Every structure is written in C-alpha cells, then in structure tokens.
Image (cartoon, rainbow, N blue to C red):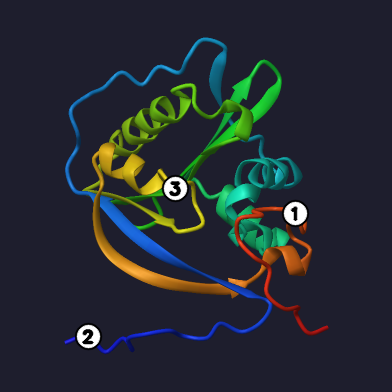
Amino acid sequence: MSTVPLGYTDVAAGHVASVVTDLEMRARPAPADHALPPGFALAPLAHGSLDAYRALFRKVGADWLWYSRLFMADDELAGILNDPDVVVRIVRRDDEDVGLLELDFRTPLACELSFLGLTPECTGQGLGRALMQQAIALAWSRPIERMWVHTCTYDHPSALRFYINAGFTPYAVRIEVQADPRLTGHLPAGAAPQVPIIGALAG
C-alpha cells in the first residue's frame, strides 16, 4: 500500500514543483533512419566550453524551466561534461547552435538520455524525431541493457507522448520541488510564463 500522502501538499514560496515521469527502454530497437534534415548537423561540445553550454542550455530549456545545470558550480559541471562516459552533441544549423543532445553512460550497462531539446525556432520540422533516433542509435551502440529518460509537467505538453512513441515505457512517477530559477537569477523572470511565480526567496 502506498505511503505517499493523498491530497494537496504545500510548496514553499519561491519554489516550483513538477510531476516527473521516468521512462525506460529495455531492448535495442529495430534500426531506423536517423539522418538529420538538410542543413543540420551534430557536433561535439568543445572541451571546456562551459559558457557556450550554459547559453545553449538556456536557449533550449528556458521555456520549460530547465535549471539543473544552471545551479551547478563550474567544477561540478566541467566534471560531468568532460567525463568520457558523458556524450554531448550540439545540433548546428550553419554556424548557430540550435539543439542539445546529452547521454550519460556513467552507470554500468545503462544510458540516461539526460537532455534532448531544440531552440523554439527549430521545433515542428521533424528535427526532434530525427534527433531522438540519433540518441537511440548512439546509446545502443554501446553495450547497454537499459536506456532511460525522465520528463516532467514543465516540459512541452507532447513530451511524454513523444518518448512513448519513440519506444520508451513509463515505469515511475515522482514529484520534484526546486527553488524557482527565475527568482534565483539563473533564468529571466519572463521564462516559462505558463508557470506562475509564487513568492520570493529569502535573501
């Protein structure tokens, strides 16, 4: 029997809460076409490019309140991005960074799809589906037994269905509470206007 209390739970002022769904893929899927549309390409993140990474992270994730990497100290973030078991690929259109794909192989026999996203002007062109196929192909090119990802209620409304259609199966639901990144200064106050800002953080 569940020990999670039913009903409403208060969230402290200055914080946000979301419902997180974890999904997994337990077997290598059948090969699929994963070519990106003409004009787009994947490129590795240049070593030590923390500012460029954070700038792209904000461009891609501000509308969905992506905040985790913005709260990290430089040394912690560099330790992740420079780890040989973390694969970061930048989606480029001409000389512009327009998307992010990040895979984490640090757990043996598993791959977390840490981040997959595009800047707003690049959505709705089929690029997301192609990028997901790139992610799946890269993940299963290594000897893994499980690929997993999580999405939350702050993500795009079609995100959960997108992952299920790609072959992932939901297996857990969690609630995440975090300081509102718009009040900490990590994201602009106008980011994610669909999510209300409640209260203010103490100084």
Amino acid type, residue under disc 3 in the picture: Pro
Q: Secondary structure at mark 2?
A: loop
1 or 2: mark nearer the eye: 1
Q: Nearer the viewer, mark 3 or mark 2?
A: 3
Which residue has dot 3 on it?
Answer: 157
User: Could you tell me which residue is drawn at 40 percent across and 43 percent down?
Assistant: 158
Numbered circle sitting on residue 190: 1
In this rendering, does residue 108 appear at all?
Answer: no
Crowd rating for badge 2 (residues with CA inside 10 Å; few <14, some 14–19, many 20+): few
Classify residue 176 as left or right of residue 111: right
Q: Quadrant of the N terminus?
A: bottom left
Is residue 142 depicted above or below 50 in this figure?
A: above
For the residue marked with disc 2, what is the amino acid?
Answer: Ser
Q: Name the residue located 57 percent from the left edge and 51 percent from the top edge.
A: 64
Q: Residues within 10 Å of mark 3 (few under 14, many from 20)?
A: few
Using the rendered view, name the quadrant where residue 163 is placed. top left
Residue 84 at x, y = what percent?
A: 49, 45
- Of the pair 197 and 188, the residue shown nearer to us: 197
Distance in Å between CA atoms under marks 3 and 2: 28 Å
Q: Earlier in the sequence, mark 1 or mark 2?
A: 2
Residue furthest right as drawn: 203
Find residue 135 and name its label: none
Asked if the residues shown at circle 1 and circle 3 are in contact, with their CB atoms under 8 angstroms apart, the answer is no
Mark 2, residue position: 2
Mark found first going from the N terminus, 1 or 3 = 3
